[in-house]
Image (spheres, rainbow, N blue to C red):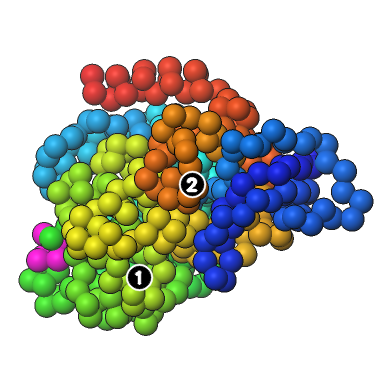
Amino acid sequence: MSSYEIKDIRAVITDETGVHFKPVSVYIDGGLIAGVNRRPDGFIPDYVYSNNARKLLIPGLINAHTHSHMSLLRGCADDMPFHTWLFDRVLPLEDRLTPQSAAWGTLLSCAEMIRTGTTCFNDMHMFEEVILDAVHRSGMRAVLSRGLVGTCRDGIPSDGGRLEQAFRDIDAYRQQNTNGLISFALAPHAPYTCDEGYLRHVAQTARAHGLRLHIHVAESRRECEDSQREHAKTPVEWLDSIGILNSQTLAAHCVHITPNDIGILRDRGVSVAVNTVSNMKLGNGFAPVPQMAAAGVNIALGTDGAASNNTQNLFRELNALTLVHKGHTQDPASVTAREAFYMATMGGARALGLDGVTGAIQEGLRADLVILNLDMPHLTPCPDEISALAYGMTGLEAETVFINGKPVMEKGELLTIDLPRVLYETEQAARKLHG
Ligand code: NI
């Protein structure tokens, strides 16, 4: 494995006191950040990145909730209500996906994420084996989970064999691959697509195998009304009453939640992945991020699938999240650029159980790093680089991306993904899907 020096560059550093800007030189060796402004003894880099006067180094962003294969459904159902979108458009189209077309969709998402500075993502998908293979080829860090929908009677789950399949694929991957970039979780889809017995069964199974849970919670108002009718509880209260919520749980969305729900999420140590663009586009609202943050809930950022966003670009999330709360509260200090950036990096790492692995430019963490080009009209002058991340950048400033100490993009060119081929194949697959 090659070693690298990124010489004299402005960087966004996160430590116990917050998110700062600092000039640094970073030394990468054996996949790790081997030193920050401290050259390891005897370190001679194989490659040096210099001439960084108009560059910015950030930790790779973490997309804490998406459905990577759904890139194929980009733009298929815009400007329609959530239930029509889900049940009349997205689910029927998703049923027509083949494993092969889903794999192309996943590679397309990986290409877009790397191209816009994301190095790690948390995926809920439908086709374990081919998705695994696509993600492995992309070189991205990921937590993968097969979406689970089912019921359970007398301890016997009925889910079309999905849970068993998930474990077969997890075991197969663990036997074949040892690079440590991919880990697994279990993903019961939502409280309204899994019954109580099945949720309990999946949660027990996750505990027995040391796996985390990834679930959609309180995404739409209708979900909450249905939950009140059926259980006389909010979705969060109900999931808590059946023992699903703990520090190993990542709840996506949490848009329609009460102050009591926020207290439960905090007390149980649940992480929340907010998906601001997706929630707003579907007319679902947006999550009460200032209230959750004030209560001490760990918050991460996600894009959700491309059928509802329509991109996998976390820079758009930084922008939307910071703006929507300022507009809504009429308080310009509500969700600052620094807070949002923390959520997109350290918050994500913690939500995925990867704190101590990735999420910051710190000695000893894996080298998941992005060099951004600031030499652009819309970023000149740039007196505050961290503000520029939320308010000025588009994501396409990402120029060079390292994952696990290895370049996966160099000067805007993807090294692990054959982009022209992926664009061609996904166009073909999407045409068949809609044809
Ligand atoms: Ni989702």
Disc number for residue 189 = none
The residue that mark 2 highlights is 383
Q: Position of residue 49 (x, y in %)?
A: 72, 36
Residue type marked 2: Pro
The range drawn in magenta is: 222-226
Quadrant in the picture for residue 257:
bottom left
* Element type where label 1 sits in the image: helix
Position of residue 139 in the picture relative to residue 233 (left or right): right
Q: Position of residue 151 (x, y in %)?
A: 27, 63
Quadrant in the picture for residue 326:
bottom left
* Element type where label 2 sits in the image: loop
Residue drawn at the location 31% of the way across and 63% of the way down: 333
Of the image marks 2 and 1, the number of the one nearer the N terminus: 1
- Quadrant including the C terminus: top left
Residue type marked 1: Ala
Q: Any magenta on residue 224? A: yes
Q: Position of residue 430 (x, y in %)?
A: 32, 24
Residue 135 appears anywhere in the view: no
Residue drawn at the location 42% of the way across and 39% of the way down: 393
Residue drawn at the location 16% of the way across and 41% of the way down: 85
Residue drawn at the location 64% of the way across and 37% of the way down: 53
The residue that mark 1 highlights is 293
Position of residue 97 in the picture relative to residue 387 (left or right): left
Please tell me how crowded label 1 is: few (under 14), some (14-19), or many (20+) other residues with Cα within 10 Å. some
Q: Mainly helix, strand or loop, the magenta region?
A: helix
